[in-house]
Amino acid sequence: MIRAALLALALLPGWAGEKRLAVLAPPEFRDALEPLLEFRRSQGFAVEFVPVERGRAGVGGEPTHLLLVGDASRVPPGAFDDGGDVVVSDDVPVVEGRRRPSIGRLPARDAPEARRLVDRLLRYEREPPPGPWRARVLLTAGEGGFGWIADRAIEAGARLAVEASLPAGWDLRLVRLTPGAGREAPRLRRVLLSALEPGALFWVYAGHGSPDSLASGLGRGLLPAPPTRTVRSMGLADAGALRCGERPPVALLLACETARIQPGRECLAEALLRGEQGPIAVLGAGAESHPYGDLAFALALGRRLRMDRDARLGDLVADARRTLLEGSPEEAVLDRGAALFGIDEIGRRRILRRTAHQYLLLGDPTLRLPIPSPLPIDVRPQGGGLLVLGNVEGEGEGFVRVEVERPGESGEILAREAVEFSGPAFRVPVDLRGRKGALRVRAYARRANRDWAGEARLTCEGGVAEGGR
């Protein structure tokens, strides 16, 4: 079976430091996949195509990355047994002394669909459009319906976990999916589709989920209690209505069961990835998840992204999994979350272990994201505003956009300026019209095919900057 084949892959020897990509797919998918295989070879990967026939595959070597191509009826998923519930997973068993590969799946149902997914991946890596979307994260928060106190705590935890792990200069936008009176489901759907249209590098959803939907909960009051009912904000049919265009995000769905991959039944993560203008990749749970584990996974993923902006998507996911398997991270936001749900140390480790195996990658694990390079900036008081100074590598024409906002949840934009520049240095004067207090200054610069993003924090009383990064 596929499970045995993956185990054999993990046991066979390889060469240290070499990037090896194994692609498991039905043999008739080979021609559709060849452009992607050739592109990875040009990037230095040793690539092996492994035909899957009747649920079996003969493999060789020890891959660093593993791409499954086909839905669950063509390439069946494995299963991780956590001593009780069986969690659907495309993971490979831990083999003592071996590094497990980074794993992803393109859920193509036939060769034409595989070709379309490949074409989209190649456009994303070869021709990503410029713009600040590359340093934008959209956080959509569905209501838990557990009571106002618990809901706000969960939302604040998700926001803090994402915000704390982002590289400097990135733009975090929060959109609440709060049910109200009247036509709740259509309104939530419109809000979600509209929020995703401008595009983002990451879309993080925190809320309720199921194999075929995202939803917000309705509760009865302030104190924690189970939700009385849920209201859908997105279903399978809505996945095809997304219009992210050439700025598709990587979707991180912090919710239950959105990636429950089963033969003969499409899950939401698969539907999102198959959408012509939907996400370029989807990370979702294959079983019921826990808010504490969800926040820990998001934080581990973001921390890894901040440390290594050149990492492949599958490597970021694999490193986040290892972080969770190593034990409970010492993070204040996670400690507060554990206290809210009354979780002791043993419970934390159990949840983290399950979460590490539950989250699956629907997408190419070798995908490289168009992440901006760090941009150190110097911010100085000037008259009734600020002067923003910075340098980027190389020569030539470029442009830089600066935004000044109030730090915190509201993210009120106080000023926005954009200028063209030539050479490595730029100067951007910003008129604040006498506004004072704590400020966050974000700068995004672009020249040719390269982007930079950075920020500085300052208190504009006497104009003394606390520092840029």
Image (cartoon, rainbow, N blue to C red):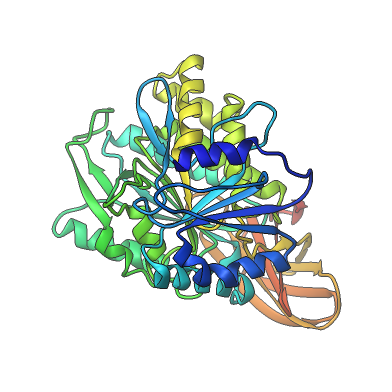
**Residue 456 locus on image (x, y percent):** 71, 56
In this image, 122 relative to 456: left or right? left
Instruction: Please say whether residue 68 is visible from this viewpoint.
Output: yes
The relative height of residue 116 versus residue 195 in the rendered view (above or below) is: below
In this image, 419 relative to 250: left or right? right
The image quarter in which residue 241 lies: bottom left
Q: Nearer the viewer, residue 119 or 76?
A: 76
Residue sitting at 36 percent across and 30 percent down? 86
Residue sitting at 27 percent across and 56 percent down? 233
The relative height of residue 89 versus residue 189 in the rendered view (above or below) is: above
Instruction: Please say whether residue 320 is visible from this viewpoint.
Output: no
In this image, 329 relative to 81: left or right? right
Quarter in which the N terminus is drawn = top left
**Residue 238 locus on image (x, y percent):** 28, 64
Q: Nearer the viewer, residue 440 or 163?
A: 163
Residue sitting at 73 percent across and 62 percent down? 373
**Residue 209 locus on image (x, y percent):** 31, 45
Q: Nearer the viewer, residue 109 or 304?
A: 109
The image quarter in which residue 196 lies: bottom left
How many labels, in total?
0
Q: Nearer the viewer, residue 371 or 217?
A: 371
Residue sitting at 37 percent across and 43 percent down? 255
**Residue 305 locus on image (x, y percent):** 65, 49
